[in-house]
Image (spheres, rainbow, N blue to C red):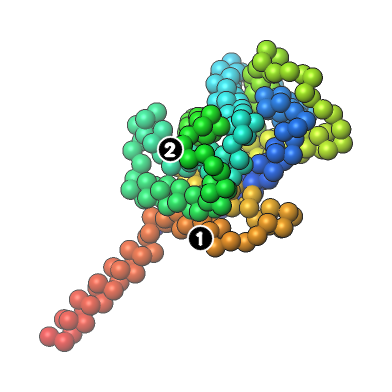
């Protein structure tokens, strides 16, 4: 197994930090559900995040070309649909824990979307890691899943699953384009088109009378826009230049872990056995994906050779 370069380590750290901040979004979104309609919240996040990035990196805008416009129009559409499905799922009554579990299944879907789109067949370790990760997420979400009375799929579940597939596709396509394009410009363009798409949806399909402005709603909008949109999307774009989509999906699955940890730290939620087991499974999944169990192979190989040499010595 080859060692990671400094650039690859930095990319993994960038994705991990993004996952930490995304872990706070479910609580933040739940707190704004009585202030903003689902699509309007996506519009706010994209508009605020994109506006901040345009001001910070205004000199880079001169490098925009038609190719950026075409790619960002497509990626922004995928990103908007993913976030919108997540918000609509919660608005439809899907509990945050259940929604988080269903959306996070993209860690399993992503390797197969990459196979379908780019004809890159996932290796056995990515498949095993994805399944182990799914088991871990289910353990973390189990308390919320058991609290729900709906056994079958409802509308909220269906919307969350659509969001999962779309997020998986977004990871795959983003991983392709960041290799040759400026991740900052890609992020700005994605958020720009995301604001347009979400704005059109909220204009035609949502009631503006349900929008409530106060100190809490403004703070939540700024936090979700600046931290959980502009910063995290830049970290994702930079990180995916060095990390393949299937591994990035596994790192992002830690979002549910950090969400629970933050809830324990700030909202005094209880530490449960299912939480600890789930975190352990997700950690094992990332180890499998990153190392391909090379350390076990090396140990097994050395043991085999040791036995062979010992037998030769005895003879």
Name, please, the residue furthest toward the right. Answer: 215
In this rendering, position of residue 285 left or right of residue 198: left
Residue 248 visible in the current orientation? no
Quarter assignment of residue 46? top right
Residue of label 2: 109
Residue 292 position in % (x across, y down): 38, 55
- Eye-nearest disc, 2 or 1: 1
Residue 9 position in % (x across, y down): 55, 52
Name, please, the residue furthest toward the top. Answer: 204
Q: Do labels 2 and 1 touch, CB within 8 Å?
A: no
What residue do we see at 56% from left, 17% from top? 70
Residue of label 1: 277
Quarter assignment of residue 149? top right
Quarter assignment of residue 219? top right
Question: Which of 209/182 is in front?
Answer: 209
Q: Give the number of the disc on residue 130.
A: none
Q: Earlier in the sequence, mark 2 or mark 1?
A: 2
């Amino acid at each position: 197994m080859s060692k990671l370069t400094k650039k690859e380590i930095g990319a993994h750290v960038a994705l991990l930090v993004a996952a930490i901040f995304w872990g706070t979004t479910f609580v933040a979104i739940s707190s704004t559900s009585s202030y903003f309609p689902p699509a309007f919240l996506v519009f706010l996040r994209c508009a605020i995040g994109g506006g901040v990035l345009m001001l910070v990196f205004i000199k880079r805008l001169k490098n925009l070309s038609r190719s950026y416009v075409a790619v960002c129009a497509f990626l922004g559409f995928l990103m908007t649909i993913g976030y919108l499905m997540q918000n609509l799922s919660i608005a439809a009554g899907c509990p945050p824990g259940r929604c988080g579990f269903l959306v996070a299944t993209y860690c399993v879907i992503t390797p197969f979307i990459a196979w379908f789109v780019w004809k890159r067949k996932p290796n056995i370790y990515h498949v095993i890691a994805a399944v182990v990760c799914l088991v871990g997420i289910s353990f973390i979400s189990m308390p919320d899943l058991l609290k729900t009375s709906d056994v079958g799929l409802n509308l909220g579940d269906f919307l969350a699953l659509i969001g999962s597939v779309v997020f998986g596709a977004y990871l795959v396509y983003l991983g392709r384009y960041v290799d040759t394009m400026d991740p900052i410009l890609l992020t700005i363009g994605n958020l720009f088109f995301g604001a347009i798409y979400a704005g059109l949806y909220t204009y035609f399909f949502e009631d503006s009378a349900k929008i409530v402005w106060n100190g809490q709603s403004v703070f939540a909008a700024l936090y979700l826009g600046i931290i959980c949109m502009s910063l995290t999307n830049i970290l994702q774009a930079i990180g995916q230049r060095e990390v393949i989509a299937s591994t990035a999906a596994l790192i992002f699955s830690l979002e549910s872990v950090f969400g629970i940890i933050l809830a324990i730290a700030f909202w005094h939620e209880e530490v449960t056995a299912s939480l600890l087991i789930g975190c352990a499974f997700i950690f094992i999944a990332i180890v499998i994906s990153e190392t391909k169990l090379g350390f076990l192979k090396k140990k097994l190989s050395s043991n085999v050779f040791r036995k062979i040499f010992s037998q030769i010595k005895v003879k």
